[in-house]
Amino acid sequence: MLRVLLVTDTDKPIGDLRDALAKLGYDMLAEPATPQALHRVVERERPDVIIIDTESPSRDTLEQLAVMNATAPRPVLMFSHDANQQLIRSAVNAGVTAYLVEGLASERLAPILEVALARFAQEAQLRERLTQAENELAERKLIDRAKRVLMEQQKLTEPAAYAALRKRAMNQSVKLAEVARQIVALAQAQERHE
């Protein structure tokens, strides 16, 4: 059962939305949060999805979303009456998964939530793959740097330097990148002392 946090910056009651979500089987968190309390409430309550009801998202709301998205990303649905394209782009950049302009129709909630959850999961996979690729590239650069150090210090060819790195990694039972990190750090320390 998904835990839903409602956020509102309007004075209008959102009891109908709460009731509609509860009927769909979602676990509703206590009281609606204000945008200013969003990050704090997300840390404390750990909702699975956030639904924001707003006339027009304020700069404060978007900043709070950006902070939350950087530290604890979650699917965010925003229902607004403001169709300004720049505002929509800003909301998406802040971490909004789905931005809907036509108001809250309870019969549309379930499919909208499912699409937002699927889109968020897909984006999370892409972020994970990007992070993995960036880490692999950083390791590759570190290994290349360590090879250059060995080639200069021990007058080795590139294949021989790579073989020396692999041998040392196997002897220490660590990853190749860890041995490369040690070699580069040692070379940097030696440069500082010279």
Image (cartoon, rainbow, N blue to C red):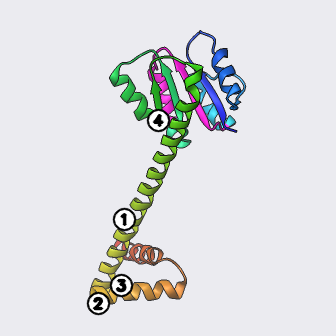
Report the residue marked by disc 3.
162
Q: Amino acid at mark 2?
A: Leu
Report the residue marked by disc 4.
95
Q: Amino acid at mark 1?
A: Leu
Q: Residues within 10 Å of mark 2 (few under 14, many from 20)?
A: some
Question: Do the numbered discs 1 and 3 sit on residues whose CB atoms are within 8 Å?
Answer: no
The span shown in magenta is 46-67
In the image, residue 33 sits, relative to residue 181, either above or below, namely above
Label number found at residue 156 = 2
Q: Is residue 100 left or right of residue 26?
A: left
Q: Is residue 15 left or right of residue 163?
A: right
Question: Do the numbered discs 4 and 3 sit on residues whose CB atoms are within 8 Å?
Answer: no
Question: Do the numbered discs 2 and 4 sit on residues whose CB atoms are within 8 Å?
Answer: no
Label number found at residue 83 = none
Structural distance between the alpha carbons of marks 4 and 1: 26 Å
* Lower position in the chain sequence, tag 1 or tag 2: 1
* Lower position in the chain sequence, tag 4 or tag 3: 4
* Lower position in the chain sequence, tag 2 or tag 4: 4
Report the residue marked by disc 1.
137
State the quadrant of the N terminus.
top right
Residue 49: x percent and y percent?
A: 59, 35
Which structural element holds mark 3? helix
Q: Residue at x 40, y 34 (%)?
A: 93
Q: Residues within 10 Å of mark 1 (few under 14, many from 20)?
A: few
Q: Nearer the viewer, mark 1 or mark 2?
A: 1
Q: Amino acid at mark 4?
A: Gly
Structural distance between the alpha carbons of marks 1 and 3: 17 Å
Q: Residue furthest top?
A: 11
